[in-house]
């Protein structure tokens, strides 16, 4: 987020990330999520909005599944 050049966005996302790790009992971001973030970044940096959108949607869906499993065992 720091690369966005938007300090408010960077601070907000850092706070959200910290709270989510606490909520789900994670000390650090899972490796597969780090890989998804890197893929989204690569697509954005390459100027490929379709691939960026697709990888972001995959990440959001995957994150939702992780959250539901963590919270409800679903």
Image: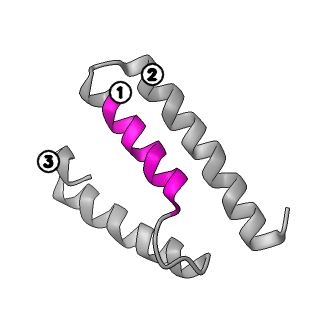
Kindly identify which residue carries mark 3: 5
Pinpoint residue 28: horizontal percent, then vertical percent: 46, 72
**How busy is the neighbourhood of tag 3: few (under 14 within 10 Å), some, or many (20 plus)?**
few
* Residue at image point 45% right, 21% down: 51
Circles 3 and 1: CB distance less than 8 Å? no
Of circles 3 and 2, which is in front?
2
Q: Residue at the front extreme?
A: 31
* Residue at image point 44% right, 53% down: 34
Label 2: state its secondary structure: helix
Q: Residue at the right extreme?
A: 74
First in residue order: circle 3 vs circle 1? 3
Indicate whether 70 appears above or below 2. below
Kindly identify which residue carries mark 2: 51
Q: Which residues are magenta?
A: 30-42
Circles 1 and 2: CB distance less than 8 Å? yes
First in residue order: circle 1 vs circle 2? 1
Residue 27 vs residue 54, the one in the foreground? 27
Kindly identify which residue carries mark 1: 43
* Residue at image point 49% right, 36% down: 56
Indicate whether 66 appears above or below 52. below
* Residue at image point 25% right, 29% down: 45
First in residue order: circle 3 vs circle 2? 3
Whole-angstrom CA distance, mark 3 to mark 1, is: 18 Å
Taking 5 as reference, is 29 left or right?
A: right
Taking 39 as reference, is 3 left or right?
A: left
Pinpoint residue 55: horizontal percent, then vertical percent: 50, 32
Indicate whether 59 appears above or below 27. above
Of circles 3 and 1, which is in front?
1
């Amino acid at each position: 987020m720091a690369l966005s050049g938007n300090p408010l966005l960077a601070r907000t996302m850092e706070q959200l990330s910290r709270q989510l790790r606490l909520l789900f009992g994670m000390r650090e971001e899972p490796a597969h999520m780090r890989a998804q973030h890197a893929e989204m970044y690569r697509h954005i940096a390459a100027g490929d909005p379709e691939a960026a959108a697709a990888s972001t949607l995959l990440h959001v869906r995957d994150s939702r599944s992780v959250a539901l499993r963590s919270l409800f065992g679903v």
